[in-house]
Amino acid sequence: MTGRWLEAALAVVLGVLAVILVLGLPRARAHDIYRGWMVPGTATSCCNERDCRPTRARMDEHERWEAWDGERWLKVPPDRVLKIPSPDGRSHLCEMNGAVLCFLPAGPKI
């Protein structure tokens, strides 16, 4: 009886670990595209694994970018616009507490 109980407990533990790994991997992979992105003109990373995401973007009447943070449109300082192609063709925003760290406008998918 003890052997079967031990086998069942081990199966449950392995199952829980498998679920944790499977649920954790997409998030890590999704953030991989932001690795290496630096705040323009600095050696500071744009991303700390929580502050970058795809976003909606538009140009204002002065032809400056605005990016949606989920609650409001943020003005993107021109010096925070990255000059690299979008990895998935979408716009991306890296911001913290409303301060834009980096912004990547949509473009052709690479």
Image (cartoon, helix red, strand yellow):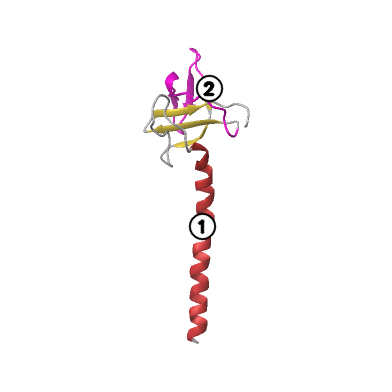
**71 in the magenta segment:** yes
Mark 2 — residue?
A: 58
Chief SS of the magenta region: loop
Left or right, 95 with respect to 104, comes to: left
For badge 1, the amino acid type reads Leu
Residue 100 coordinates in the image, percent (x, y): 41, 28
- Residue at point 49%, 25% (across, down): 82
Closer to the camera: disc 1 or disc 2?
1
In this orientation, does residue 3 appear? yes
Q: How many marks?
A: 2
- Dot 2 falls on a residue whose secondary structure is strand
**49 in the magenta segment:** no
For badge 2, the amino acid type reads Arg
- Dot 1 falls on a residue whose secondary structure is helix
Report the magenta residues as a range. Answer: 59-88
Mark 1 — residue?
A: 21
- Residue at point 43%, 20% (across, down): 79
Along the viewing direction, whichever of 72 and 101 lies nearer the viewer: 101
Residue 51 coordinates in the image, percent (x, y): 43, 37
Residue 27 coordinates in the image, percent (x, y): 51, 47
Alpha carbon separation for disc pair 1 and 2: 37 Å
